[in-house]
Amino acid sequence: MPDCYSTRFDDAAAFAIAAFRGVRRKSTPVPYITHLFSVCALVGEYGGDEEQMMAALLHDWLEDVHGATEEVLAERFGQRVASMVAALSDSDAPAPGKKKPEWRGRKEKYLAHLREAPHEVKLVSCADKLHNCQTIRADQLRVGNSVFERFAGRKDGTLWYYDAVCEALGQGWDSALLHRLQREVAAMQATARDGS
């Protein structure tokens, strides 16, 4: 039986683990790497190939690691992986002490790109947003709408963004994974209304 993946996948996993070793999920004690592996698992479970799974592991590297470049990813993991990671990023990581560009503008730019993105990128983006939404929902059921205070968009912006992501992903692409995201977003919105 042939291998399911090559040692390139091992390298991408080690690279992600090293890059995010000291990072935790926003306002939680949870190691950030759990998110990257969760997104990777969803991509693999919904038909993504090895390079899409690698892009899932690396999808936040350009946004969150200062000095990260697409060229480094291309040299290390190939141009296809690097291009997918670039397409999944809404900005470059800011220099220490600096902030990312304004939240709403970054998200609107990302959404415009996502509408036209190839299906291979949409699958990884959808997996990313589904896992984010699931973790928000779990905390929403535990602590109520105060969960939204940890996000730059707060409650209204976060709800708008996830609804807009579903719309953008659905432009020319359909997947059982997207249907899962749509259901999760609808549940998040309903709980937010009930708890407001």
Image (spheres, grey):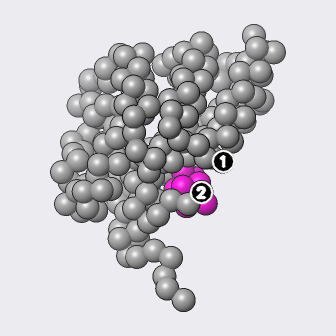
| Residue under numbered circle 1 | 176
In which quarter of the view is residue 111 placed?
top left
Q: Earlier in the sequence, mark 1 or mark 2?
A: 2
* Residue 148 screen position, x and y as percent: 61, 21
Q: Are marks 1 and 2 in contact (CB under 8 Å)?
A: yes
Which residue is rendered at x = 44% and y = 31% of the image? Answer: 115
Is residue 131 visible to the viewer in this orientation of the structure?
no
Identify the image quadrant of the C terminus: top right
Kindly give the residue lying farthest to the bottom in the view shown: 1
Amino acid on which disc 1 is placed: Ala
* For residue 126, side relative to residue 92 (left or right): right
Secondary structure, mark 2, is loop
Q: Which labelled disc corresponds to residue 46?
A: 2
* For residue 96, side relative to residue 171 (left or right): left
The magenta region covers: 37-46
* Residue 63 screen position, x and y as percent: 34, 37
